Amino acid sequence: MPSFPSAARAAVADTRLRGNLAHATSTIRGRRADAVAELDDWAALRESGKQIKDHVLANLGHYLRMLEERVTAAGGTVHWARDADEANRIVIGLVKATGETEVVKVKSMATQEIGLNEALAEQGVTAYETDLAELIVQLGDDRPSHILVPAIHRNRSDIRDIFLRSMPDAPEGLSDSPAELAEASRRHLRAKFLSAKVAVSGVNFAVADTGTLVVLESEGNGRMCLTLPETLISVMGVEKLVPSWRDLEVFLQSLPRSSTAERMNPYTSAWTGVTPGDGPGEFHLVLLDNGRTATLADEVGRQALRCIRCSACLNVCPVYARAGGHAYGSPYPGPIGAILSPQIRGIGSEVDASLPFASSLCGACYEVCPVAIDIPEVLVHLRARAVESGPRHPLERTAMNAAGWTLRSPTRLALAQRAASASRRLVGRRGRIRRLPGPLKAWTDTRDAPVPPPESFRAWWARTDGGRTEERDK
């Protein structure tokens, strides 16, 4: 993937995409605000979620061992995967052991993160997405662009065209009516639900003291995948733990309101190991690290592991609303992706090194986060890491040394400010500098720079006798 600015440039120029994003994010944002406003104790609920997640992260080894013991005691099998390749090998091996060549899938960010569908396809196994939005993305040979609504960049006519082109049993004369589109997908998937012997899911939460896995969803497709197949394989990031059911109760309130703007999820499915005669007869849990341990070691960056994948930060982000999810080059778009992807993947690629800069630092993401992740703080932290580890322009050190020398002396600073004010007529017109010279042009490639003011605050203060001593102390 190219850097974020390069990928975003084409997206910003796509007026139809920006229209779709603006309509969808503003609608979700407004509904979420209404749902959250219903709770007088939302701030306390948010703080509880933060404290629970931080407690788990501080005791992660203990709770992971407890979860493994409980799942195993309930008849499940636990597998540990250090990275994406190992997780894919485990899942592929489990599917091949059943002799099946098809699996149905519950919407899962973790399996997108490791590229499971593509890895299965290379081994002759077809994965069928059953979430409506994920199905649209899959049939369109596309990529998700939102955590909650993966096909947010598509409108109804796009979806109708995709169904008619790629869904073999799509009815002739299919319109773009939401009801008809939903019915077409329902009929298409019904046969898969009834015939599939293997299902793959993600995990929203895992209750450590009982070994219970929990999936929250709105359509019922997850319930079908979790109960009908003979074998269930769940891939879970190691940070998805909560200690007990009492702790889970906090997130069963905060996640629906922050994601779908509902008071509770229509479908909350929970299962503990296997139960003879009820649901899958074989259950496997794949615990995925894939950079999470390294993230946990970062005192500032580790708060990204609190994320419960609600997507509220995407819907308030002015950058995401204009660029869309594809520009982030990751299954995790938006503000949370800008801090999570560079940590779990490292800042070795062009796109990951650029993601911490894909923000205006307005702070709206922090205000809506139901577990109080200070995304702007982590962004600034990762920007420093990207600068330290990345290539530097030969003039950068010289410029920073000159700035430091100037700022260390009030006299030198005052001279520099007077020189800047004197140059304002030369460097810009109509209050803007459209193009800076040399390496500084990187700033004006994407934005105008303001011209220096006619006088500095220091000069104004001296000229007005301290603002006339604050209007004579009022």
Image (tube, grey):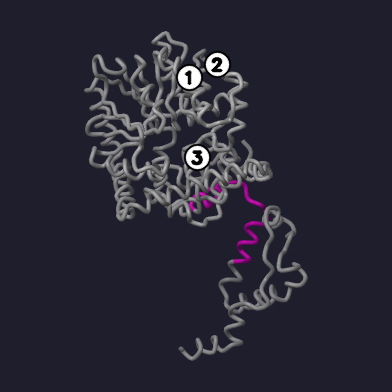
Tell which of 311 and 221 is nearer to you.
221
Q: Amino acid at mark 2?
A: Asp
Task: Answer yes or no: is residue 141 visible.
Answer: no
Which numbered mark, 1 or 3, is in the foreground of this view? 1
User: Which image quarter is the N terminus in?
Assistant: top right
Q: Position of residue 162 (x, y in %)?
A: 60, 25
Which is nearer the N-term, disc 1 or disc 3?
1
- Is 70 left or right of 110, judged from the image as shown? left
Residue 15 is one of the magenta-drawn residues: no
Near-viewer residue (138 or 115):
138
Residue at 29 percent across and 36 percent down: it is: 61
Instruction: Find residue 187 and name its label.
Output: 1
Earlier along the polypeptide chain: callout 1 or callout 2?
A: 2
Residue 290 picture quarter: top left
Q: Which residue is mark 2?
A: 169
Q: Position of residue 283 (x, y in %)?
A: 32, 19
In the displayed structure, would residue 464 be above or below residue 57? below
Q: Which residue is mark 3?
A: 341
Q: CB atoms at circles 1 and 2 under 8 Å apart?
A: yes
Say which residue appears at 29% left-offset and 39% top-offset: 242
User: How crowded is the residue under tag 1: few (<14 C-alpha within 10 Å), some, or many (20+)?
Assistant: few
Q: Which mark is residue 118?
A: none
Residue numbers of the magenta segment: 381-403
Q: Is residue 451 above or below residue 382?
A: below
Number of numbered tags placed on the structure image: 3
